[in-house]
Image: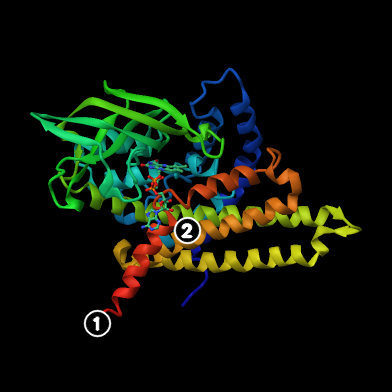
Amino acid sequence: MDFAYDARTNELREQLLAFMDAHVHPAEAVLAEQLADPARERWAVPAIVGDLQAEARKQGLWNLFFVDKHSIPGEHGAGLTNLQYAPLAEITGRSPQLAPSALNCAAPDTGNMELLAQFGSAEQRERWLRPLLDAEIRSAFAMTEPEVASSDATNIATRIERDGDEYVINGRKWYITGAMNPQCRILIVMGKTDPAAEPHRQQSMVLVPRDTPGVTVKRGMTVFGYDDADHGGHAEVLFEDVRVPVGNLIGEEGTGFAIAQARLGPGRIHHCMRAIGIAERALELMCRRAGERVAFGKPLAEQGVVQDWIAESRVRIEQLRLLVLKTAWLMDTVGNRGAHTEIQAIKIATPITVEWILDKAVQAHGAAGVSQDTPLAQLWAGNRTLRLADGPDEVHKRSLARRELKQYRS
Ligand SMILES: Cc1cc2nc3c(=O)[nH]c(=O)nc-3n(C[C@H](O)[C@H](O)[C@H](O)COP(=O)(O)OP(=O)(O)OC[C@H]3O[C@@H](n4cnc5c(N)ncnc54)[C@H](O)[C@@H]3O)c2cc1C
C-alpha cells in the first residue's frame, strides 16, 4: 500500500496551488464586487469566472475531472484517474465559488458531461458535449420535483409522452442548479415515459434546450437566503406541453433511473473531495483567528476547548481524506458499482463532518463567523445542502444498511 501521490498528481498539485495563489484567491474579492454591482445581469455568471477560465485553459488546468475511461480519445480531458483527480478537486474546494468553474470542473456540468459521454448518441455529443467541454455553454440536470418526495426517484411524476416523432413533456421541477444562468442552454430532464412499467423502468431522460417553447424558468430558489447567482442559481422550472424530437432521448426509453444512478456516483465523490478542501480552509481560518483573538487574558488558541476543536478537526479531515482516496481508488480499479458501499460511506460521512468543522470555525470567530466578512457562513450553507442533494443522508444509510444486513440473512 502506497500513501504517496504519484508524480503526475504532485506536478498538477503544485501547478494548481500556484494557480490558486496567483489567480483564484485574489479573484474572490473581485467576485464579491461583481456580484454586488447593481448594473449586472442578475443571473449571468460574473465576468471574473470567464477570465479565470481563460487562464486555467492556457495552463492546461482544464476538464481535469474527465477521467480517462469516459474520455473522447485524443480530444479532451487530462486523462486522470479518480485517484489522481481527488487531491486536485480538494484544492479547488478551498474556493468553491470560483475554482471548480475556473477549471470547467463544476457541478452540474461535470455530471452532465459524463452522462453525455457515456450514454449520449454521436449527434448529442457533438451538439451538446463539445460546447460544454469548451465551456461555451452551461447545462442543468432536472430531476427533483416540489410535489413528490424526490429522494425516491421512482416518485418522479413529470410525464414524457411520445407523439409521433416528438416527445411531449409536462411537469414541474425545482432546485435545478445552474438553470437561472442565461448561458445554460440545455436541460437533461428526467420523467416517466411508461408509468405502467415496473418501478425502475418507468423513467427516461430527454435533452430539452432551455429556449424550447413551453419551458418557463420561474424563479431562483434560495439556500439559507443565498441565491448562488455566482453559479447560475437553483431554478424552479415549469414544462408545459414542451415538444422535442425523439432523437433527444438519452439512451433508451425506461433507462432513466439507471442513468441517474450512474451519473450520481462520480458526482458524489467530486462533492466530497471539494468538501475536504472546504474543511481545510475552515481549519486554517479557525487556527489563525484563535491565535490572534484574545479573551480573558489569553489567545483563544490557549483555551483547551478550542484546542480540542482544532485537534478533532485535523483527525476528522485525515479520516475523511483516507476514505475518499480509497473510494477513488476503488472506482478506478473495480468500477463505480464495486465502489458502491464506499461511495455511500463518503456521502454520509463527509458533509456532516465538514459541517461540524465549519461550525467550530464559525464559533471561534464569534459574530464575524456568521457575517459576510469571512467565507464561513456561505461555506456552511453550501455544505449543509450536501446532506440533501444527491440523496439525503438517511437514504444512503438505508441502502448501505440493507446491503450490510443482507450478508447475515439466512
Ligand atoms: C442546493 C441544492 C441544489 C440541488 N440541485 C439539484 C439539481 O441540480 N437537480 C435536481 O434534480 N435536484 C437538485 N436538488 C434537489 C435534491 O437532490 C433533493 O432535494 C433531494 O434529492 C431530496 O429530495 P426532496 O427535496 O424531494 O426531499 P424528500 O424526498 O421529500 O425527503 C425529505 C426528507 O425525508 C427523509 N427521508 C427520505 N427518505 C427516507 C428514508 N428512507 N428514511 C428516513 N428518512 C428519509 C430525509 O431526511 C429527507 O431529507 C438540489 C437541492 C439543493 C438543496
Q: Nearer the viewer, residue 356 or 275?
A: 356
Q: Is residue 257 left or right of residue 197?
A: right
Which class describes the residues within 10 Å of circle 1: few (<14), some (14-19), or many (20+)?
Answer: few
Colour setup of the view = rainbow
Q: Which residue is mark 2?
A: 86
Marked residue nearer the N-terminal end (2 or 1): 2
Q: Quadrant of the C terminus?
A: bottom left
Q: Nearer the viewer, residue 279 or 202?
A: 202
Placement of 41 over or under 178, stated as above or below: above
Quadrant of residue 332 within the rendered picture? bottom left
Task: Identify the residue at horizontal 51%, vertical 43% (top origin).
Answer: 59
User: What is the number of callouts on the image?
Assistant: 2
Q: Is residue 154 left or right of residue 93?
A: left
| Disc 1 C-beta below 8 A from ligand 1 | no
Expressed as whole percent of the image width and height from the top left, the position of residue 279 reads 60, 56
Expressed as whole percent of the image width and height from the top left, the position of residue 120 reads 23, 43
Amino acid bearing label 1: Ser
Q: Residue furthest top?
A: 39
Q: Residue furthest right?
A: 297
Distance CA(mark 2)–CA(mark 1): 39 Å
Instruction: Kindly indicate whether the residue at mark 1 contacts the one at mark 2 (C-beta within 8 angstroms).
Output: no
Per the image, label 1 sits on a secondary structure element best described as: loop
Task: Identify the residue at horizontal 42%, vertical 35% (top origin).
Answer: 178
Residue 118 visible? The answer is no
Q: Which residue is mark 1?
A: 410
